[in-house]
């Protein structure tokens, strides 16, 4: 039922499989004139997360201070992290939260999204995007995927708007920005609030501006598999002081900021331990991102030469992907009908852990169950909920979930030679596909 769970399991097993083969241990990235140079790799890169004495000292400092939470009189680390992350992402304000989900819940709460409101979201995402909407008793409406980028299609978003639409919630899936030119233009033209689910997208940029502040704000996750992690954690970024204050007051009971109360709030605070870890993790974030940038560009160059393995395109305004995942489309027809499942098995045999990625969220049992949820039937009416499943059909996404292949972000932290090995294994399978498909 839960594609995200499989994503997380995959991210865990991807690390495990690579580790078993000892890939990437202590080697340095090679460089070539054709793609940007990767930062040198000096640590094992198949494990995740990476940590050293910086993280250890940071955690012990918090432990010894006795000030472990935002309300414990200290809050030094949480505040420091909020300032550092806002500065790094070129945002004016940051409110740290306990997870990406609670960053979304905080934002939806601050926007007072609730029963009767429709929120437009993509089907190609982690279920938490959906859950944050239903936890607010708003109605999630799916807008189909763009076949080339795997991101939400702005034209389908426009078509999904009704008078009840209160929020556009695109997701920067895999860390690559959705088409923010088209989406911001749509939000402006229709006067609808835009919030970015940037949970997978720290450091991602659209026209050289980090994501998260193209609408009212952006939500980030620092969960265990993420490129910037504290095990669990999250943040809301915004340039809007009033929204920042509303978020602050929502995420902590009795929030002290000057903003009118909406009568809704929660406790979604990040701890000092998590903030200390995030600050330590941030010291290596850029170097890791540079390695991923170079390796992803190189791998795409190589995969594009193999018929039937098409890397997800970056939308034209994307100046940097966060590379939380490396995604490509596997076209079985160009591999003599060799199924994706067999293709993945063959990769695994060569020590290349890859995943089939998300299953179809909009047609999943979890999503369909909403149609018969008594609260939803009462709020929206039986007729609306009966037709809701049909309204959410996403044929482009249906095909994508059958064809996508993912590599984890840790794969992109391996030496450049590993990208060559991945491509040559895939090229080898492609050449022998007819025979392999029959075996
Ligand atoms: C696109 C997306 N949205 C929301 C979330 C929720 O974040 P968290 O797991 O930190 O609650 C995630 C995390 O995996 C995500 O990938």
Image (cartoon, rainbow, N blue to C red):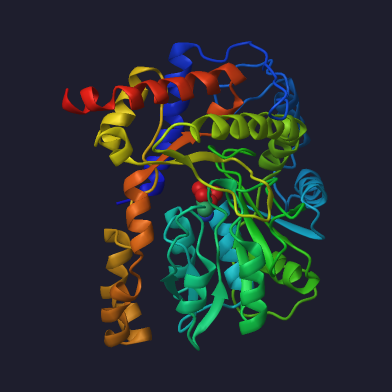
Picture quadrant of residue 238? bottom right
Q: Residue 279 location, x and y as percent?
A: 75, 38
Q: Residue at x 28, y 27 (%)?
A: 433
| 213 lies left or right of 302 | right
Q: Is residue 225 above or below residue 31?
A: below
Q: In this view, does 280 lie above or below 350?
A: below
Q: Which residue is drawn at 74% across and 55% down?
A: 207
**Closer-to-camera residue (308/239):** 308
Residue extending farthest to the left is 438
Q: Residue 319 location, x and y as percent?
A: 71, 48
Q: In this view, does 5 lie above or below 166?
A: above
Q: Residue 149 location, x and y as percent?
A: 52, 52
Residue 409 seen: no
Q: In which quarter of the image is the C terminus?
A: top left
**Closer-to-camera residue (206/264):** 206
Q: Residue 355 location, x and y as percent?
A: 38, 36
Picture quadrant of residue 293? top right
**Closer-to-camera residue (110/319):** 319
Q: Is residue 326 above or below residue 428?
A: below
| 232 lies left or right of 10 | right
| 405 lies left or right of 296 | left
Picture quadrant of residue 14? top left
Circle count: 0
């Amino acid at each position: 039922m839960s594609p995200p769970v499989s994503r997380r399991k995959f991210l865990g097993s991807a690390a495990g499989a690579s580790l078993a083969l000892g890939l990437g241990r202590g080697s340095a990235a090679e460089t070539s004139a054709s793609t940007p140079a990767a930062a040198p790799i000096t640590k094992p890169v198949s494990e995740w997360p990476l940590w050293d004495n910086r993280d250890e000292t940071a955690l012990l400092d918090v432990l010894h201070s006795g000030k472990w939470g935002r309300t414990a009189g200290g809050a030094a680390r949480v505040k420091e992290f909020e300032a550092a992350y806002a500065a790094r992402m070129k945002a004016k304000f940051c409110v740290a939260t306990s997870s990406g989900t609670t960053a979304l819940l905080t934002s939806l709460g601050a926007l007072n999204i609730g029963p009767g409101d429709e929120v437009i979201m993509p089907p190609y995402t982690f279920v938490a995007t959906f859950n944050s909407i239903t936890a607010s008793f708003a109605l999630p409406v799916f807008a189909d995927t763009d076949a080339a980028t795997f991101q939400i299609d702005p034209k389908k978003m426009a078509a999904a708007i009704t008078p009840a639409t209160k929020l556009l919630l695109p997701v920067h899936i895999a860390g690559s920005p959705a088409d923010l030119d088209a989406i911001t233009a749509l939000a402006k033209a229709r006067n609808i609030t835009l919030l970015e689910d940037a949970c997978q997208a720290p450091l991602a940029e659209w026209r050289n501006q980090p994501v998260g502040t193209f609408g009212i704000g952006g939500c980030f996750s620092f969960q265990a598999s993420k490129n910037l992690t504290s095990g669990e954690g999250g943040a809301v970024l915004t340039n809007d002081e009033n929204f920042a204050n509303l978020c602050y007051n929502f995420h902590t009971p009795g929030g002290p900021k000057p903003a009118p109360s909406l009568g809704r709030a929660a406790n979604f605070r990040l701890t000092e331990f998590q903030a200390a870890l995030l600050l330590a993790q941030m010291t290596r974030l850029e170097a890791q991102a540079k390695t991923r940038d170079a390796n992803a560009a190189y791998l795409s160059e190589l995969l594009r030469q193999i018929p039937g393995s098409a890397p997800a395109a970056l939308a034209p305004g994307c100046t940097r992907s966060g590379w939380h995942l490396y995604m490509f489309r596997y076209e079985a027809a160009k591999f003599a009908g060799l199924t994706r499942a067999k293709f993945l098995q063959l990769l695994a045999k060569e020590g290349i852990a890859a995943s089939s990625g998300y299953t179809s969220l909009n047609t999943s049992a979890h999503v369909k169950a909403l149609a018969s949820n008594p609260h939803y039937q009462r709020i929206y009416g039986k007729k609306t909920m009966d037709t809701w499943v049909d309204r959410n059909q996403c044929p482009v996404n249906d095909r994508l979930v059958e064809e996508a292949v993912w590599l984890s972000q840790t794969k992109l932290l391996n030496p450049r030679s590993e990208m060559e090995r991945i491509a040559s294994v895939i090229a080898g399978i492609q050449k022998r596909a007819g025979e392999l498909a029959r075996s």
